[in-house]
Image (cartoon, rainbow, N blue to C red):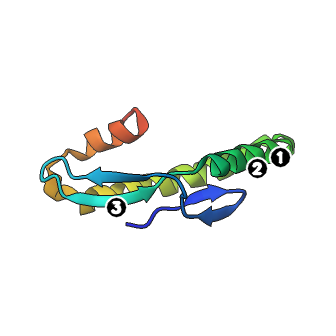
């Protein structure tokens, strides 16, 4: 599983510590994720701060369409990952709740 950070519209590898994700049933390593370095966190905050005026000036309907598209893609990714992780025997609704704080 490859993961990347999105900073200023670019996908980059995390340059911080490695976060190891394990299957709780087997303790098998599922993924190793690069976390952001302090410089990458600063760059992400700066990029978000610079993007805020453009986002705020965008019509609400357009912002809503973008957020809805993002939500749909996120749900699809959760479903796909859950299907790949069925061997863990973790119910899909619990995975959704764990990731989003509610059932999707």
Which quadrant would residue 82 be assigned to in this image? Answer: bottom left
Name the element at disc 2. helix
Which quadrant would residue 10 be assigned to in this image? Answer: bottom right
In the rendered image, the vertical position of residue 13 relative to residue 75, given as above or below: below
Picture quarter with the C terminus: top left
Q: Name the residue under label 1.
A: 50
Q: Marks 2 and 1, Cα distance to the nearest angstrom?
A: 5 Å
Between 57 and 98, which is closer to the camera in this rendering?
98
Furthest-top residue in view? 101
Residue at 74% x, 45% y is 48
Is residue 104 something one can see in this rendering? no
Between 28 and 89, which is closer to the camera in this rendering?
28
Picture quarter with the N terminus: bottom left
Any mark on residue 47, and which? 2
Where residue 14 sits in the image (x, y, percent)?
A: 54, 58
Q: How crowded is mark 2: few (under 14 residues within 10 Å), some or many (20 or more)?
A: some
Q: In the displayed structure, does residue 35 sit left or right of residue 96? A: right
Name the element at disc 1. helix
Q: Which of marks 1 and 3 is nearer the N terminus?
A: 1
Name the element at disc 3. helix
Q: Mark 3 points at which residue?
A: 80
Q: Which of marks 3 and 2 is nearer the N terminus?
A: 2
Q: How crowded is mark 3: few (under 14 residues within 10 Å), some or many (20 or more)?
A: few
Q: Marks 1 and 3, Cα distance to the nearest angstrom?
A: 33 Å
Where residue 88 sits in the image (x, y, percent)?
A: 16, 52
Q: How crowded is mark 1: few (under 14 residues within 10 Å), some or many (20 or more)?
A: few
Q: Are marks 2 and 1 in contact (CB under 8 Å)?
A: yes
Where residue 59 sits in the image (x, y, percent)?
A: 82, 44
């Amino acid at each position: 599983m490859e993961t990347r950070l999105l900073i200023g519209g670019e996908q980059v590898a995390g340059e911080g510590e490695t976060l190891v994700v394990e299957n709780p049933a087997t303790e098998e390593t599922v993924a190793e994720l690069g976390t952001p370095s302090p410089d990458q966190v600063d760059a992400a905050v700066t990029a978000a701060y610079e993007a805020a005026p453009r986002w705020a000036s965008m019509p609400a309907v357009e912002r809503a369409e973008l957020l809805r598209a993002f939500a749909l893609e996120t749900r699809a990714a959760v479903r796909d990952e859950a299907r790949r992780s069925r061997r863990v025997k973790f119910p899909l609704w619990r995975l959704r709740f764990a990731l989003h704080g509610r059932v999707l």
